[in-house]
Amino acid sequence: MTCESWKPKLDAYVDGELQSEEQRAFDAHVRTCPSCAADALARLQMKRSIRTAGKRFTPSTEFRQRMQPRIAAKPKRSPGFIWVTTTALVAILLVVDLTAIYSGRERVRTQRIYSEIADLHVATLASASPVDVVSTDRHTVKPWFQGKIPFAFDLPDLQNSEFSLLGGRMAYLDQSPGAQLIYELRKHRMSVFIFRDGSLRGKLDENSSLTKELPFSMEAWSQGGLRYFVIGDAGAADIDRLAKLFKSTGS
């Protein structure tokens, strides 16, 4: 299928709204077409900026409207009682607003991090040289990162699994260096990103469900002082299987 026929469907593709068969065909096309891959990356970045701007917290008036009748002065109650009640309710409102602001900011930060991970994965697919160290041998790929990143990590043994290691490259998230490993499963390419957990502490909501809003399947977790992200166009079950292989290296 020519690029001209794909271009009108790019937005639906990055939103994950294509039919499964057409989505898979587009995945294969993006891996071989730098032009469409670059356009998909640009759209992802634009959507990320729009989502971030649209999620900025605006205090809701619903709670104030519900509480306003209780704040109003009532007959037979002393001014002192009204003042104490009003002060207490204002304090409650302040706590509620601050909590909502904090939660909103956490969501925006988490969404930004996850969107950047998705952008890094798409940029890799669009790159003419997706890996800096090309090897299927974990004992070759792992040592390549020594001295390049400020931490060490283990790679799982892929024997008796369907996954293939293609290689690795440097990655940066919030200006922190990390590792990106590229794996393949039935022509689906998946990225495993590894960063120091400390560099991302306080920037991610541990209980966030935002991974479900991404155009890719993704799983994220912390283990042994490191933060892992597994992302790709494979199904959620395959992403989970690859994640379990990495989790088993630290058990």
Image (cartoon, rainbow, N blue to C red):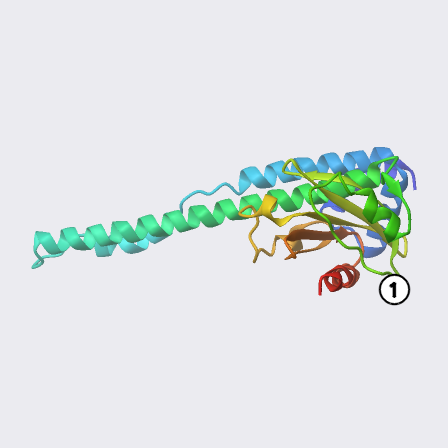
- Left or right placement of residue 30 versus residue 76 in this view: right
- Across and down, in percent, residue 61 comes to 36, 47
Give the answer, above or below, for where 135 lies relative to 164.
Answer: above
| Label 1: which secondary element | loop
- Across and down, in percent, residue 127 comes to 84, 36
Q: Is residue 37 visible?
A: yes
Q: Amino acid at mark 1?
A: Ser
- Left or right placement of residue 67 versus residue 208 in this view: left
Q: Is residue 73 visible?
A: no
**Residue receiving disc 1:** 161
Residue 21, quarter of picture: bottom right
- Left or right placement of residue 136 versus residue 95 in this view: right
Q: Residue at x 36, y 52 (%)?
A: 96
Mark 1 packing: few (<14 Cα in 10 Å), some, or many (20+)?
few
**Which of the two residues, 168 or 62, is positioned nearer the viewer here?**
168
**Which of the two residues, 14 or 238, is positioned nearer the viewer here?**
238
Q: Residue at x 66, y 51 (%)?
A: 227
- Across and down, in percent, residue 202 comes to 53, 47
**Which of the two residues, 138 or 53, is positioned nearer the viewer here?**
138
For the N terminus, the quadrant is top right
- Across and down, in percent, residue 45 comes to 68, 36
